[in-house]
Image (cartoon, rainbow, N blue to C red):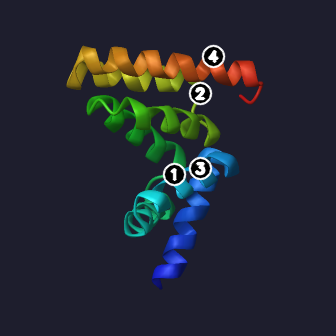
Amino acid sequence: MADKEKFEQGREVVKRLFGDKRAAIIEENLGKFSPGFQEFVMDGFTIYDRPGLDWKMRSAVTIATLTATGRAQELVLHVRGGIRVGLTEEQIREIIMQVALYAGVPGSIEAFIVANKIFDKIKEEGTG
């Protein structure tokens, strides 16, 4: 796959996960930081289109990984993305609880705080 095609594929994944508005903000911010980094990140998102795992499973793994590594800022995006691809609030809560057992309670507490804020915001917006 040509680099431009892969970049466009990644861009479409980002739009599907985060919506057009958030995807545009992400792309703009990455481009301001570094066009090379923007390309690297967009190319990386093509992993969602690989066979073997559906988007819900990939999103669950991402939420678990971000929780375990204490990446709360990225978790904000990926909780929303998980909901967009079909994860329920209950599933997201269970993912975070599972991580607590294996990777630590403090990171999971932070993840619960982030996720609850997102759940509340989505209910306010009426988008979920």
Ranked by sequence position, the earlier of labels 4 and 3 is 3
Ranked by sequence position, the earlier of labels 4 and 2 is 2
Ranked by sequence position, the earlier of labels 2 and 3 is 3
Q: Secondary structure at mark 3?
A: helix
**Image depth: mark 4 or mark 1 in front:** 4
> Residue 116: x, y in percent?
53, 16
* Contact flag, marks 4 and 1 (Cβ < 8 Å): no
Numbered circles on residues, count? 4
The Cα–Cα distance between marks 4 and 1, rounded to whole angstroms, is 26 Å
Ranked by sequence position, the earlier of labels 3 and 1 is 3
The Cα–Cα distance between marks 3 and 1, rounded to whole angstroms, is 25 Å
Q: Which residue is mark 3?
A: 25
Residue 69 shows in this picture:
yes
The amino acid on which the numbered mark 1 sits, given as a three-letter code, is Asp
Q: Secondary structure at mark 1?
A: loop
Q: Is residue 11 left or right of residue 105?
A: right
The Cα–Cα distance between marks 2 and 3, rounded to whole angstroms, is 25 Å
Nearer to the camera, 38 or 52: 38
Q: Secondary structure at mark 2?
A: loop
Q: Which residue is mark 1?
A: 54
Checking the image for residue 120, the label placed there is: 4
Checking the image for residue 88, the label placed there is: 2
**Image depth: mark 3 or mark 1 in front:** 3
